[in-house]
Image (cartoon, grey):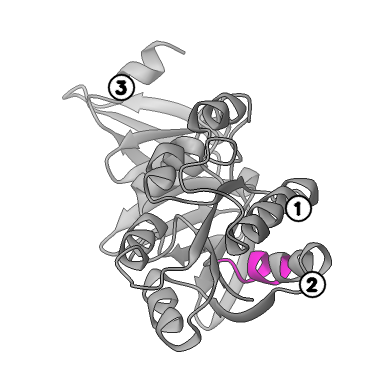
Amino acid sequence: MRAIIADDEPLLRHHLDKMLADVFPELEVAGKAASGEEVLALCQDVKPDVVFLDIRMPGLNGIGVATALNQLVSKPLVVFITAYDEYAVSAFEQEAVDYLLKPIEEKRLQLACDRIRARLANSVEEGDQESLDIEALLRQLSTVKPEYLYWIRASKGEDVHLIACDEVSAFVAEDKYTTVYSSQGQHIIRTPLKELMTQLQPDLFWQIHRSTIVCVKRIEKITRGLTGSATVIMNDGQKFTVSRRAAALFKSM
């Protein structure tokens, strides 16, 4: 039996590979991918029995990959992996065998592997509600607290830096990139601002403009111009404009 691991985080790919070696030793990890396009290319070459598939990846996301895989004559089984439970129903609409939340627990992975074995042995009938109980899954997911970012990987020249989120004062969207302002200086990341907002703690980071997210605890003061426009001044001296729509946030403080 062969598998592909697809996730844009190298550490997670490595960690899952090691976990699978322990709980599913007869399963060969025949390839790893960092994007949806890489998954589809690997599937053509490797023809895996199962794909462990991250939902949020650059380019084609996991739901799109699963949709494409379902068009194949010999389609692999899919186990979705993600830090966000909002995709649960969409995942099971693509006939997923299971749905794992990050960080992956070994006991939960073991259950997913048992389901894979059963499917590959044709011992689970199609549509078996014991393994595809969406309502039970949603009840389980509703009790899971969302996982927020604690670290940002950012580029500066040829170097890649790790920046703790609590050291960040602001994220500013610029063209296709996002600039990270922190105690370490300015760095560039490729993550869009809209995606960042779903990964940051909402009580700590506010979007004050369509192109700007600031860390609330790093705001030193707010000034208002003659026209009524507001500007936040951070404790590192950086200044950012507040949109009229976001101004209500500060009135409620």
Q: Which of marks 3 and 2 is in front?
A: 2
Pointer 1 or 2: first along the chain: 2
Q: Is residue 11 left or right of residue 181?
A: right
Which of the 4 image quadrants contains residue 71? bottom left
Q: Mark 2 points at which residue?
A: 25
Magenta-colored span: 9-15
Type of amino acid under label 3? Ala
Whole-number angstrom distance, CA of label 3 to CA of label 1: 49 Å
Residue indicated by mark 3: 247
Name the residue type under label 2.
Answer: Pro
- Does residue 3 lie above or below 108 as drawn? below
Q: Helix, strand or loop at disc 1?
A: helix
Per the model, the C-alpha gap separating discs 3 and 2 is 56 Å
Q: Residue 45 appears at what percent x and percent y?
A: 45, 88
**Residue topped by disc 1:** 110
Which of the labelled discs sits on residue 238, or is there none?
A: none
